[in-house]
Amino acid sequence: MRCKALIIFAVLALAAAAALAAEGKPDARVSKLLGRLHIDYSTTDTGNFSIDYDLGSGRKQTVYIMSETETYGSLEIREIWTNAGNLDSEPSSDDLMQLLQDNNDEKIGAWSLESSDDGGPLAYFSVKVPTYLKDKDFSDMIQFVAQVGDAMERKLFDADDNQLNARRPFLPPRAETHSTRRIRTMARAAAA
C-alpha cells in the first residue's frame, strides 16, 4: 500500500514539475490582443497577465488572464479570472450561499473557492473562453469578469480592489495555474 502511494506521489510530482516548467512565458497571442485593444497590463513571474481594470467611480478590479490554455477536442480554452477576496477560514453559510446564488444568476462563468497562500479560502470568479474570441468579445469578457468580481467584493467585504477586506487583509494567490495547484494538492493527499 505504501509503495502504491509513493508511485502515485512520484507520478503526480512529475506532472506538477512538467506543468511548472511549461509556465513562465507570456502567451504572445494575448500580448498582441491586449495591445490591439489598448489595454495596459503587466505579466506575473509565471507568465500570466494582470490587468487593473478601472470600473469608474474610483473602483478598480484586478483581472488575470492565464497564458496556459487547456484543450477539449480541437477547442483551445483560456481562463480569465478575478477574486473577491479571502474568506474566513470557516466561511459562513451566508457567504457560501451568496456565491452559489450568484453562480445561478451569471450567464457565463462561476465562483469557486481555492486555498490561498495563508491556507484560507479565496473566492474567485472564472470564465473559460475559446482562444479564438474576436477582440471585442475578449474585451467584453475582461469587463464582465471585473464587474462580477467587484460586485461580489462589495457584497462580501464592502471593500475595493482586494486591498483590504473587512475580515482580513487580501493575500494575493500564487501566480500559478489552478491546474498546477490541483496537482500539488493531489500529490500532498497521496503522500499523506
Image: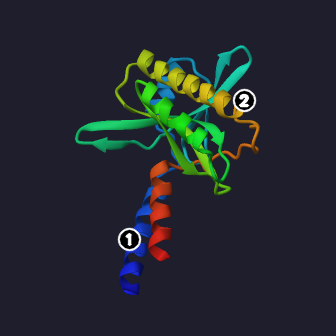
Q: Position of residue 38 (x, y in %)?
A: 57, 17
Residue 63 occupies which quadrant of the picture?
top right
Q: Position of residue 192 (x, y in %)?
A: 50, 76
If you read the primary sequence from the N terminus, does the residue marked by circle 1 or circle 2 appear first?
A: 1
Horizontal side, residue 184 vs residue 171: left or right: left
Helix, strand or loop at label 2? It is: loop
Extreme residue toward the front, this view: 93
Quadrant where the N terminus sits is: bottom left
Horizontal side, residue 10 vs residue 62: left or right: left
What residue is drawn where x is 41% and y is 85%? 2
Tag on residue 158? Answer: 2
Q: Amino acid at mark 2?
A: Asp
Tag on residue 11? Answer: 1
What residue is drawn where x is 53% and y is 49%? 24
What residue is drawn where x is 58% and y is 44%? 93
- Residues 84 and 27: in front is 84
Horizontal side, residue 54 vs residue 181: left or right: right
Q: Position of residue 16 (x, y in %)?
A: 45, 62
In space, the residues marked 1 and 2 are separated at their CA atoms by 43 Å
Helix, strand or loop at label 1? It is: helix
